[in-house]
Amino acid sequence: MSSSVSITLNQCSRTFAGGNTALQPLDLQVHPGETLVLLGPSGCGKTTTLRIISGLESPDKGGQVLFGKRDVTALPIEKRDVGMVFQNYALFPNMSVADNIAYGLKIQRLPRAEIAQRLDEVMRMVDLQGFGDRRIDALSGGQKQRVALARAIAVRPKVLLFDEPLAALDAKLRDRLRIEIGQLLRELGTTAVYVTHDQDEAMALGDRIAVMQAGRIAQLGTPQEIYHQPANAFVADFIGAVNCLDVIGSRADGGLIVHGGELSASHLQDVPTVYCRPEDVQVVPLDQADVRGTVVQSIFLGQSQRLMVDTGDASLLQIEAPSRQRWPNGTAIGLALPSQVLFHPAKPTPSVNTKEMANG
Ligand SMILES: Nc1ncnc2c1ncn2[C@@H]1O[C@H](COP(=O)(O)OP(=O)(O)O)[C@@H](O)[C@H]1O
Ligand SMILES: [Mg+2]
């Protein structure tokens, strides 16, 4: 939609009664039409941030919320023109699907014909055609969430806010609705903020992701940046699995000595540890290996398997291996860890790395 609005938070902190600081002073900008995901563990301040954007919560004194250039800090939720979708649906259980979806439209006193047309349009968008007369308590969880979604978009809000909308659904339904919400958000072009603790959901839906930790933003970036260039160990560990190898020495030629072998990484000098993702480690013949170890466990995942390899390091090395091959426990295994997959949060990653991956 051409009328998409930006969201700006200036120095928004939130301290609750008793001195519990949920949010440190936060600066955040959501671009017009963008979907920004707030991702982080339980209790890190995601919901508080979303509620401050919605008007359900006020920031501490000094904090400011802008929609576009308009200061909405003092406006209550009903004056902010936001649509919200919650984990627990928050529907009227004894009203029909159509009455739930049309609720906001009736409050806006839209003409009856326009309401009927909007109902038709949004029920089609969320794949609920024919369900208008159903009672809410006669719907499945996934259908209820579609109703909540339809209700939120029916009023054509400036801003869409989601708080863990898929958390109560089973895995298969979650995957499907995640794809549908993504399509819907692209179609609508409405500025959206989406809260989740699920990294897959965050990467699938976010144009950008703000990873939160203890009331602060630990990193803000595209899914690719967050995954391939994590700003610190917390982000690296929270997003996907990561290996952290102790560096126990270095060679004159720059080679890094680790348990079980040696790595070449000219972009990583003077680091105490080296990081790599399980899927970036390759199994190779022992005589071609950078690092050697022993398989101590293999976890079958269907599309792949996770091998746990003891290299003598304090922690086991996790690697992602093809699903059909077998490495019985105790097997000696050779691993290649090419320079371009090694990183350290404190060091810039060579840009060629992510560019090459982006080009496929
Ligand atoms: N109304 C409240 N009163 C007191 N503490 C609260 C209130 N709401 C949230 N908190 C606290 O603020 C912190 C952040 O909460 P929240 O924003 O809900 O986190 P998240 O959504 O990331 O799980 C938590 O420690 C939580 O216990
Ligand atoms: Mg929450």
Image: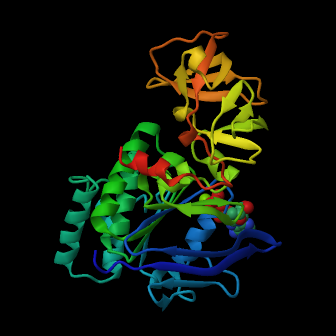
- The quadrant of the rendering that contains the N terminus is bottom left
Q: Is residue 289 above or below residue 3?
A: above
Q: Nearer the viewer, residue 287 or 133?
A: 287
Where residue 307 sits, quadrant-wise, is top right
Question: Where is residue 253 drawn, in percent x and y?
Answer: 69, 38
Q: Identify the residue at horizontal 45%, vertical 58% (top origin).
A: 206
Q: Position of residue 91 (x, y in %)?
A: 43, 61
- Image region (quadrant) for ligand 2: bottom right
Q: Residue at x 60, y 15 (%)?
A: 286
Q: How far across and how far down the image is residue 81, in percent?
A: 41, 80
Instruction: Say which of 266 and 344 sits in front.
Output: 266
Quadrant hosting residue 56: bottom right
Q: Position of residue 265 (x, y in %)?
A: 63, 41
In the figure, 94 relative to 76: above or below? above
Furthest residue to the front? 252
Can I make out residue 168 in this image? no
Locate residue 101: give its quadrant: bottom left
Q: Which residue does the image show at 70% across and 75% down from the upper left? A: 14
Nearer-the-camera pick, 210 or 274: 274
- Image position of 216 (left or right of 52): right
Q: Is residue 135 left or right of residue 296?
A: left
